Amino acid sequence: MINIATVSYLNALPLIAGLEREPGIALSRSVPSELLATIETGAADLALCPVVDFQTSEADLELVPSGAIGCDGPALTVKLFSRLPFSDLESVVIDRDSHTSVALLRIVLHELHDCHPVFIPSSRAARHTDADALLLIGDKVITTAPDPHVFRHRLDLGAAWRTVTGKPFVFATWMTRSGMDLGDVPARLDRLRRLNRSRTAELVAHHAQECGWPEDLAFDYLNRNLRYDLGDRELAGIEEFWRRCRDLGIIDELRPMRLYPGEG
């Protein structure tokens, strides 16, 4: 039995829809910030982890190139909402559910606005309507977005990254502990991803409403905003992100990228 941990957001459906019916697989769900711990503790053999976790984990990890959640332009569901012009920000309430998006926000605010605010973590960031700025991720950007008349300044972090680097951005990808034997699971995940990409309309019809999304917006989001490949351009984007994290002191020292099964 291979234990797999993932998120429950709409954006993960093209990677995981149908996985619960696969033989020899046990599936669990959590928020992004908790998935790394499932690998480190052995509760999961494979997890859809934020990409920054590869560098910050105490465990030796490998990326499993069977799919990812990323974008090559606007991400739609990773956004900064602000009352003030971004260059004037002194503090941001951040969504505690994310690791990668917080690091990405530091980078784009530094690069585009020479801004280095204090970040205030919260498990209920969307409710801090008295804050100067909010970073929200996932379905909350659609279902509980703050009042646009109050939070007039908005920054899509996927679009901002593309402006800064010209590269796609990867928010999360499959990871496992070094030395794990996952059998044929990586190949099965890749086949499932390809199948699900061909049936987006069906996934939207079954799941958009339960996630709080209008169906037409959900269809465009999964088809146009998000990318699920982990090819050479995406891997280059990950390495660029890690380098910029190091340059800003978000991570201390870069680990070389390792791909399952043990390839450098």
Image (cartoon, rainbow, N blue to C red):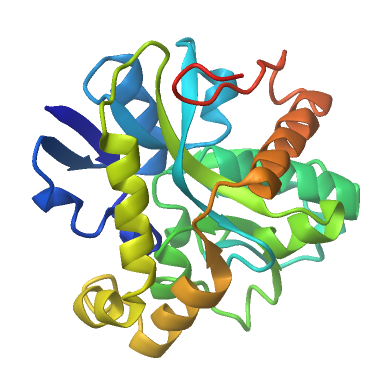
Q: Position of residue 105 (x, y in %)?
A: 69, 47
Q: Is residue 219 above or below residue 19?
A: below
Name the residue rendered at 35%, 86% in the picture: 214
Seen as rendered, the residue at the extreme bottom is: 216
The residue nearer to you, when weighing 190 against 43, is: 190
Q: Is residue 143 left or right of residue 169?
A: left
Q: Is residue 15 visible?
A: no
Q: Is residue 163 left or right of residue 2?
A: right
Q: Position of residue 237 (x, y in %)?
A: 71, 44
Q: Is residue 130 left or right of residue 66?
A: right
Q: Quadrant of the C terminus?
A: top right
Name the residue rendered at 28%, 53% in the picture: 16
The residue nearer to you, when weighing 59 against 127, is: 59
The residue nearer to you, when weighing 249 against 253, is: 253
Q: Is residue 115 above or below residue 42?
A: below
Q: Quadrant of the N terminus?
A: top left
Q: Position of residue 79 (x, y in %)?
A: 60, 62
Q: Is residue 252 left or right of residue 207?
A: right
Q: Position of residue 8 (x, y in %)?
A: 28, 54
Name the residue rendered at 83%, 61% in the picture: 163
